[in-house]
Image (tube, grey):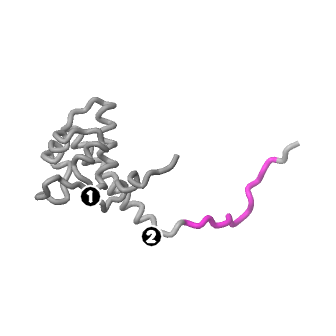
C-alpha cells in the first residue's frame, strides 16, 4: 500500500491545519471543535486568524479521544478532559524518552565466584 504524501503532512507537529481539515480528520463537526476550544482543550495557533488554525500535534490525541468517545459514549466535556490527559501523557512520555537517552544502559557483568551446583542427570 503506497503512502500518500498528504498523509505525512499532518504527522508533522510543526505544521498548522485549518479547522475544517481538523474536523474532517477527526470525525468531528466544526461546532464540536468550537466547543472544545471554549473548554480550553484545543488552542488555536493564532486567535485572530479567520479560519482557525491548529497545530498538527493535536491530531493524534484528538483522534484517540474521539475513538474513545464512540466506544464509551462520552459527552464532549468528558472528551475535552480526556484530550487534556492524553496530551499530558504524551508530553510525559516524551520527557521520559529524553531522560532515558541521557542515561547509560547498565552493563551485564559476568558472575564472579563459584558456579552454581547442578545435579548431574543420569
Residue in the picture at 34% in, 42% down: 64
Tell me where the magenta segment starts and ends, as one range.
106-119
Spot occupied by residue 121 in the image (x, y as percentages of width and height): 85, 44
Q: Is residue 115 magenta?
A: yes
Q: Residue 34 or 68: which is nearer the viewer?
A: 34
Q: Residue 33 got which mark?
A: none
Characterize the magenta stretch by its predominant secondary structure.
loop
Residue 73 appears left or right of 93: left
Q: State the image quarter where residue 92 is shown.
A: bottom left
Q: Are marks 1 and 2 in contact (CB under 8 Å)?
A: no
Residue at 71% across, 65% down? 113
CA neighbours of label 1 inside 10 A, class few (<14), some (14 to 19), many (20+): many
> Residue 94 in magenta?
no
Q: In this orientation, which residue lies closer to the viewer: 93 or 109?
A: 93
* Residue located beneath label 2 in the image: 102
Q: Residue furthest right?
A: 122
Between discs 1 and 2, the one toward the N terminus:
1
Residue 91 lies left or right of residue 99; in this view the side is left
Q: Quadrant of residue 94?
A: bottom left
Element marked by disc 2: helix
* Residue 116 locus on image (x, y percent): 73, 56
Q: Is mark 1 on a helix, strand or loop?
A: strand
Query: Residue shown at 30%/55% (left/top)?
Result: 56
Circle on res. 16:
1
Apparent side of residue 83 relative to residue 3 in the rendered image (left or right): left
Q: In this view, does 108 lie above or below 86?
A: below
Q: Where is residue 47 in the image (x, y as percent from the top left)?
A: 13, 57
Q: Mark 1 or 2, which is nearer the eye? A: 1
Q: Residue at x 31, y 44 (%)?
A: 25
The local crowd at label 2, few if under 14, some if 14 to 19, many if 20 or more residues have their Cα within 10 Å, is few
Distance of label 1 from label 2 (alpha carbons)? 31 Å
Amino acid at each position: 500500500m503506497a503512502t500518500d504524501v498528504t498523509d505525512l503532512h499532518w504527522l508533522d507537529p510543526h505544521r498548522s491545519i485549518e479547522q475544517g481539515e481538523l474536523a474532517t480528520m477527526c470525525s468531528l463537526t466544526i461546532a464540536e471543535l468550537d466547543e472544545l476550544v471554549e473548554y480550553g482543550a484545543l488552542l488555536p495557533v493564532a486567535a485572530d486568524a479567520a479560519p482557525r488554525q491548529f497545530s498538527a500535534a493535536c491530531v493524534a490525541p484528538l483522534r484517540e479521544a474521539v475513538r474513545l468517545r464512540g466506544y464509551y459514549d462520552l459527552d464532549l466535556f468528558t472528551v475535552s478532559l480526556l484530550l487534556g490527559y492524553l496530551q499530558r501523557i504524551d508530553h510525559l512520555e516524551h520527557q521520559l524518552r529524553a531522560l532515558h537517552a541521557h542515561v547509560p544502559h547498565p552493563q551485564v557483568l559476568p558472575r564472579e565466584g563459584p558456579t552454581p551446583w547442578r545435579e548431574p542427570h543420569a
